[in-house]
Amino acid sequence: MKSVEVECEAYGFGESGRYTDGLERIELYVEDVYVSSLARLPKAGERQQATFSTPTGDYEGGIRCYQGQWPYLCPNLISKKNGERISLARVLRDNGINPRDRVRIRVSEGQWILLGLRQDALSKA
């Protein structure tokens, strides 16, 4: 699969989805208009392994599809550096991404690479 750039929403779960440290639980959903550009989506109930790469490190995680249509990066990751569990919320926060932000991601077979905030979001900051 060749790589493709997509936009995702850092979907936050609000007050009902907080970790014990206070961070809001986040899943990273591919925006609707980009879903058709992805080569292989997980089937219902399936979790595909993927590496999530950011400027602060690489993490092992999983990709699922909500209702078989909307792919997302699962909220629980494992650091490749030290093997420790870490939340997607913490990784995104450490990279300047907050709940409900829209970000650019480069997707290729088994890898999601964080490119940064969507351009129009940068102009509002």
Image: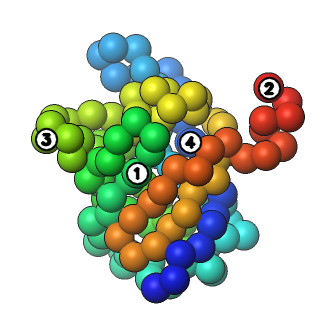
Q: Earlier in the sequence, mark 1 or mark 3?
A: 1
Residue type at numbered disc 3: Gly
Q: Which mark is residue 83?
A: 3
Q: Locate residue 62 relative to residue 14 in the image: left or right.
A: left
Q: Which mark is residue 125?
A: 2
Q: Secondary structure at mark 3?
A: loop
Residue 59: where, in percent of width, then height? 30, 48
**Residue 8, visible in the rendered structure:** no
Near-viewer residue (39 or 29): 39
Which residue corresponds to the image point at 67% horizontal and 42% vertical from the top-left? 117
Q: Which mark is residue 11?
A: 4
Residue type at numbered disc 4: Tyr
Q: CA distance from mark 2 to mark 1?
A: 24 Å
**Residue 79, visible in the rendered structure:** yes
Near-viewer residue (44 or 91): 91
Q: Which residue is most to the top?
A: 21
Q: Which residue is most to the left?
A: 83
Q: CA distance from mark 1 to mark 3?
A: 15 Å
Q: CA distance from mark 4 to mark 3?
A: 25 Å
